[in-house]
Image (cartoon, rainbow, N blue to C red):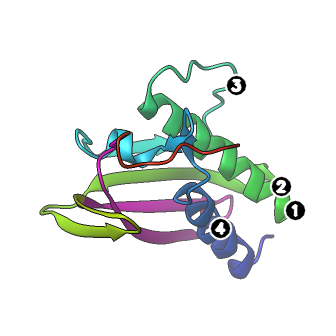
Amino acid sequence: MPTRRVIKSVLRNLLGTLTSRYSDWHGYWLFGFVVSDLEPIEHDLLMHIEGAPDDTPMAHLRSLATKRFQEQLSKAALDPIRIRQASLGVERLPGSVQISVPNFAAVGYRMRFVVRAITDVGNAYECVETISVAPHDPAQEFRSER
């Protein structure tokens, strides 16, 4: 049976990797594309989406979240059969925030990510991450070289 520490680390690491700069859409930070029109979403992380089209930033977010969840399970040597349910909730919080980055400032929003998992024995776990995101502005942002 997976320990509480292992499952919590899988959830924390998922949020850390998902919200990082390495989550991009055509070389730009993914969340700048979705924050302006974001309606709350709830995504099933156990859904098999191999071959799904990533033709929109939101579709890419969903497939990336599922892929990163599977990667974190693998890194923790946690058999996916041990997870009965897993979901990611994403929402834009009310209000706006001032975001300052090198060379420019922008008005943005706070995005809240909540990942939940229920094990095969019924134990429930949850982790939350809140980040500040400015809408995508190609005149101010640098494209990733990756």
Residue of label 3: 50
The image shows residue 107, relative to residue 40, as above or below, that is below
Q: Which mark sits nearer the N-terminus, 2 or 4?
A: 4
Q: CA distance from mark 1 to mark 3?
A: 21 Å
Label 2, label 1: how far apart the Cα atoms are = 5 Å
- Where 109 sits versus 146, above or below? below
Tell me the kind of residue under disc 3: Glu
* Residue at the disc numbered 4: 13
Classify residue 120 as left or right of residue 115. right
* Residue at the front extreme of this rendering: 103
Q: Quadrant of residue 73?
A: bottom right
Count of numbered badges drawn on the protein: 4
- For the N terminus, the image quarter is bottom right
Q: Which residue is mark 1?
A: 77
> Looking at this rendering, what residue extends furthest in the bottom direction?
5
- Dominant SS of magenta comes to strand
Earlier residue among tags 4 and 1: 4
